[in-house]
Image: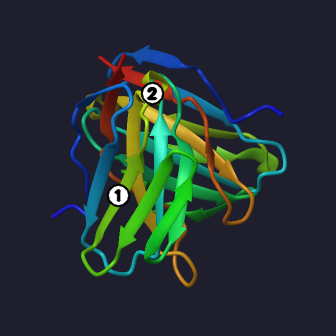
Amino acid sequence: QKEVEQDPGPLSVPEGAIVSLNCTYSNSAFQYFMWYRQYSRKGPELLMYTYSSGNKEDGRFTAQVDKSSKYISLFIRDSQPSDSATYLCAMSYGPGGSYIPTFGRGTSLIVHP
Amino acid sequence: EAGVTQFPSHSVIEKGQTVTLRCDPISGHDNLYWYRRVMGKEIKFLLHFVKESKQDESGMPNNRFLAERTGGTYSTLKVQPAELEDSGVYFCASSQEHTEAFFGQGTRLTVV
């Protein structure tokens, strides 16, 4: 079983739709949870991170962590064609352990006009 | 401010040859990381420098890979001799302490 599972997609949605991206993980020791966005031929860029369980909102983006279910989500409201990219979840141990992230495979998102 | 830059952006070499990838981190970032993504797989950690010292090289696949960071500035990753399974995209990232790591655009390595 992989440490981090993420459906590679592609996920195709119309402009304005609410997008839900998800990851599951197996290691309960992970404490930091991150979402990266990667455009074609570019490196990943950090979108959001959360520590432990809970929700975090930043503009049109909301990250949720459910540690009891080992499940994290990223919601994108009012999706735009410019949101088309690969979204990678990642997680790390944090304080007392390593901050180096373990990545999921990434989900390819296509938002069409 | 310049971001993380990697050279070359793309390299095609024959099996058995040597290739050296270079990464210039953001100025002032003591932490430098190398990652690799093989097609269809996850981005995998290779190693971590703090200044010129290797902090963690647990992800290095074998002794054909050699990473250096001269004077705690830029870093090189040499593959010698290259094998077909080394093909992929090699990313470098840098950070201050445990803050956000900034990634370069990657070097796409193709071994034929």
Residue linked to disc 2: A80
Question: Quadrant of the rendered structure where residue A45 is?
Answer: top right
**Label 2 packing within 10 angstroms: few (<14), some (14-19), many (20+):** some
Q: Is residue B104 above or below residue B62?
A: above
Do tag 1 and tag 2 residues touch (Cβ < 8 Å)? no
Residue closer to the observer: A111 or A1: A111
Counting the numbered discs, the total is 2
Mark 1 residue type: Ser
Q: In this view, does B112 lie above or below B78?
A: above
Image quarter (top left, top right, bottom left or bottom right) of the N terminus of chain A: bottom left
Say whether residue A39 is left or right of residue B102.
left
Percent x, y of residue B93: 61, 45
Percent x, y of residue A9: 21, 36
Percent x, y of residue B38: 31, 36
Image quarter (top left, top right, bottom left or bottom right) of the C terminus of chain A: top left
Please indicate, yes or no, whether residue A14 appears anywhere in the rendered image: yes
Mark 2 residue type: Gln
Say whether residue B68 is left or right of residue A85.
right
Q: Element type at marker 2? A: loop
Question: Residue at horizontal 38%, vertical 35%?
Answer: A86
Q: Residue B41 carries which label?
A: none
Q: Earlier in the sequence, mark 1 or mark 2?
A: 1
Question: Residue at horizontal 25%, vertical 63%?
Answer: A24
Q: Element type at marker 1? A: strand
Chain ID at mark 1: A
Question: Residue at horizontal 42%, vertical 33%?
Answer: A79
Looking at the picture, the colour scheme in use is rainbow
Chain ID at mark 2: A
Report, in whole angstroms, how far the alpha carbon at label 1 lies from the one at label 2: 19 Å
Please indicate, yes or no, whether residue B18 appears anywhere in the rendered image: no
Residue linked to disc 1: A73
Foreground mark, 1 or 2?
Answer: 2
